[in-house]
Image: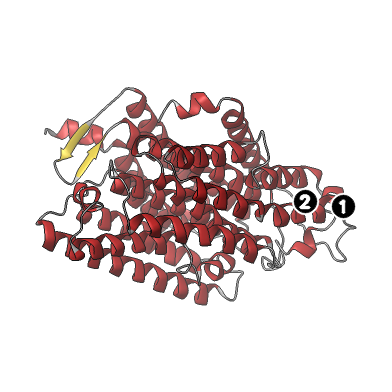
Amino acid sequence: MNAQAILTAMLPEHLLLIGIVLTVILEIAGKARHAALPVALISVGAATVAAAWLALSGYSAAPFAGQFSVSPGPLMAKAMVLALALPVLLIAGSDFGPEGSYGGEFSTLLLSSLYGVCLMQSADSFMTLFLGLEIMSLPVYVLVLLAWRRPQAAEAALKYLVLGGAASATLLMGASLLYGASGSLDLATFAQALSSTDPLVRTAVVLVLLSFFLKAAIVPFHAWAPDAYEGASVPVTAFMAVIVKAAVLLAAVRLFGEGRLVSPVLEIVAVLPLVSIVWGNLAAMRQPNLRRMIAYSSIAHAGYLFYAFLGEPEGRLQAVAFYLLAYGLLNLLVFTALPPAADDGERDKLENLKGLFHRNPFAALMIGLAMLSLAGIPPLPGFIAKFLIFKNVIAAGYVSYAVLGLVGSFLGIYFYFRVIQFMFMSPDAAAPVDGPVRRIAVTASLACLGAALVVAVFPGWVMAHW
């Protein structure tokens, strides 16, 4: 394949790479404090447009045969994840201040992580998948450390590093066993191995699957994920909850391919996500602050997403992508609308959200709408996403698992409505900590709200692109 074809196929990645180089140059020149974030926004925006353009034009290519390829589905997945990263950058922009600027390192690390995210969506071998996973993960460990306002940031980063390292080691062990059994590192061997009865191959499949469970924080591999979410700054928590989660689940769809689940993998994919749904929702009820509550909520949502793999292979990408889009937009809406505060540790305590509607009606309405959608209340996009997942599970014949999952999902309604009750039906907090609302945060909130309304009103049109 010639150089022009390689440049076209990897256009989103190259645009991100240009952004990385420019932010590094700005940091060296001492201009990063004010210029790095706009450069990152332009780079991610251009990469989003490039990925969407290639996908809508039906472009397919394999610039590195057996390692990296692109087609409309993965390209649209890249466009979606990159688009979801734009509000994260806007949140970071609203948090920047004279005493709290991250400098150029935040933009450089975030762009580097997004490069790994894009690489994962085009991986054709375990080698490329592992490379993308590490490029995505390593910058996030450092991003957690940039929570300059949180004293527990170092501990949170260490815990997230241990979790990520365990996931990487498990993936390598599974891939090596699969290579030993098949003689190939192609991702397609995993889909073929799903129906194997060879103990060695089954062990390899389970190890690879557990590595994805670790990255997605599925119970019982979730233990330190809430600590990492709580210890990070708001933009980084949003990035971990939305972008990292989306990258892992979309890569899992590519990994499973056209493979069908059979016992014992079927029971693992059904039972552990079901436990995650129940435990995530139950644990979220007891959390004292919004950030930690969303961490446990994301554990439950990861369970819903892995339920999609019980359905027919043809509908997996559509179900997972639509759910991630709805889940991502509404989670980002919460983070963009969350009022700023001088004390980042007090910012999202539920006690301090009491009476928010009387102090900041816009923020309360945005967060309340997001809570209703994440709870799965119709006709909001969260309901449509859950409906699509469970419809596919029932269509595949797993009615009992679908019923149990639906019952587990009802538990989440309590803590989502609890946030609404605090904001709308409680007296003002004794000592409100809200800071001045920034225009850039309002812009990010309106962008997320507009996109969520499009998803809710035109779900068929959105799904048609998958």
Q: At 46% from the left edge and 59% from the top edge, which residue is drawn?
A: 271
Res 1 quadrant in image? top left
Q: At 51% from the left edge and 25% from the top edge, which residue is drawn?
A: 460
The picture places residue 207, in percent across and down from the top left corner, at 29, 65
Quadrant holding the C terminus? top left
Residue 420: image tag: 2
| For marks 2 and 1 on the same chain, the one whose residue lies earlier in the sequence | 2
What is the basis of the colouring in this image?
secondary structure
Q: Nearer the viewer, residue 6 or 272?
A: 272
Q: Is residue 418 left or right of residue 400?
A: right
Asked if labels 1 and 2 touch by Cβ distance under 8 angstroms, the answer is yes
The picture places residue 130, in percent across and down from the top left corner, at 26, 58
Q: Is residue 402 left or right of residue 289?
A: left
The picture places residue 399, in percent across and down from the top left corner, at 50, 45
Residue 425: image tag: 1
Confirm whether residue 224 shows in the render.
Answer: yes
Would you place residue 155 above or below residue 311 in this image?
Answer: below
Furthest-right residue in this view: 427
Confirm whether residue 23 shows in the render.
Answer: no
Q: Residues within 10 Å of mark 1 (few under 14, many from 20)?
A: some
Res 201 quadrant in image? bottom left
Q: Nearer the viewer, residue 40 or 385?
A: 385
Q: Amino acid at mark 1?
A: Met
Q: At 59% from the left edge and 28% from the top edge, which residue is drawn?
A: 454
Q: Nearer the viewer, residue 252 or 328?
A: 252
Say which element carries label 1. helix
Q: Residues within 10 Å of mark 2 (few under 14, many from 20)?
A: many
Q: Is residue 179 left or right of residue 210?
A: left
- Determine the CA span between mark 2 and mark 1: 8 Å
Would you place residue 440 above or below residue 96 in this image?
Answer: above
Q: Nearer the viewer, residue 194 or 457?
A: 194
